Structure formats: C-alpha cells, structure tokens
Image: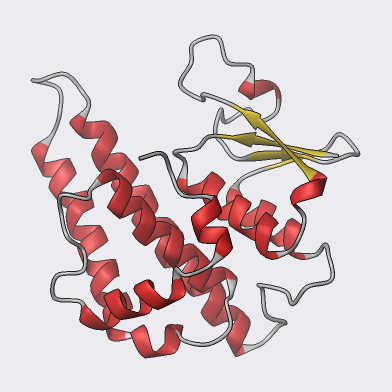
Amino acid sequence: MMKLRWSATSPYVRKVMMVVIERGLADLVERVPTDPWSADTDLPEDNPLGKVPALTLETGTTLFDSPVIVEYLDSLGDRPPLLPPAGPARWAALRLQAVADGICDAAILRRLEAQRPDGEKSATWMERQRRAVARALDLLESEAPSLDGDLTIGTLSVLVALGYLDFRFGHEDWRAGRPALAAWHEAAADRDSVRATAPPA
C-alpha cells in the first residue's frame, strides 16, 4: 500500500486526495497524518524539503511534490485520466494547474507573513501576494467558459485553489466581480471528491 503524508489543511494534499478519489484509488493509499511545522516531525525522512504531500510507493521510492504525485496517480487505475494525452488539451490542463497552484502559493505566503510578529511582517509583501491572487482570479474569470467540460487536473486544481481561498480568506469574497467563475465553481464543486476532502470548519 502507498503511504501519503497528509494534512487536512494543505491545498496540495487536498489536490492529491481528490485525484485519489476521482481515480478510484482510495483503497491503495494510506493517509499518514503529518504536521510539517512540528519541531520533531520525521517528515524530512520522506521529503528532505519538509513539505506535504509526499507519497511513498510500495517500492520504497517517495514522490513529491503535488504535480509529480498526481501525474503518477493518474497513471494508475482504469477510470478516465485527468491529464489529457499530449497535445493542446494537455497543455491547457497543465497551465490551469500552474495558475491554481500559484494562487495557493501566494495565499500561503501571505498568510505566513501575516503570522509573523509585529515589527517583522511586511505589508508590502502581503499586498504583493494579494495582488497576484487577484490577477490570477481575473484571468480565470475571463476564461471561465473554457473551464466547462470533463474534469481535468487543471479544473480540479482550480477547485482546490478556490476552496483554499474560502478556507483561509473567507472574509474576502473572491466571487465579487467574478460572476462567471463563481457560477462555474458552484456547479463544478458538486462532486464527492470535493465534499470528502473539505478542510476542517
């Protein structure tokens, strides 16, 4: 059985778990609860970068980070793949995944900066990350019609990113001024994999 270093609040772990569910692999993956911020975590034994997710295969090889893990998982099982074959559709899906992961990256950097002690945090840095997220959301709004259709690793990643904004920045309504993206999200989020991986309330 594969072992996944797992945290309920990580959007990258959520992405991997959604792929596990969508590909019908839940019985093949054991979740290992991991706090990467703990001083005594043994996570670096599996991932020297000290980050989740990390997936240890039955061979003993450990894969990281989420784009590598989801590509491996997508190669397993017999359900329709989330990564399209080589060609324009694949590049479109990978581009969306990059945009969505970038939203999560910037949101996490902003949150970590806000948690620093007074006198050490940078308002300029936090605003830079906020603007990066806003620009990415505006891009997704302009391309919302292209998000319709079969689920891909790109649209799955966008669902994860928007869910993370609701989780960590729920007081800032990303839906305001983005009606097409909001409508797509409401319809696309009606999936078992989204409900089963929701972060804690």
Which of the pair 108/29 is nearer the observer? 29
The residue located at (55%, 76%) in the rendering is 93
Question: Relative to 66, is 1 above or below?
Answer: above
The residue located at (74%, 77%) in the rendering is 80
Residue at the far right: name it. Answer: 59
Question: Relative to 190, is 63 above or below?
Answer: above
Quadrant of the rendered image containing residue 48: top right
Q: How many labels, in total?
A: 0
The C terminus: image quadrant:
top left
Horizontal and vertical percent position of residue 79: 78, 73
Question: Relative to 42, is 166 above or below?
Answer: below
Quadrant of the rendered image containing residue 108: top left
Which of the pair 194/38 is nearer the observer? 194
The residue located at (15%, 49%) in the rendering is 171
Residue at the far top: name it. Answer: 40
Horizontal and vertical percent position of residue 38: 48, 16
Q: How is the image coloured?
A: secondary structure
Relative to 39, 24 lies left or right: right
Horizontal and vertical percent position of residue 113: 23, 33
The residue located at (41%, 39%) in the rendering is 200
The N terminus: image quadrant:
top right
Horizontal and vertical percent position of residue 16: 61, 52
Quadrant of the rendered image containing residue 103: bottom left
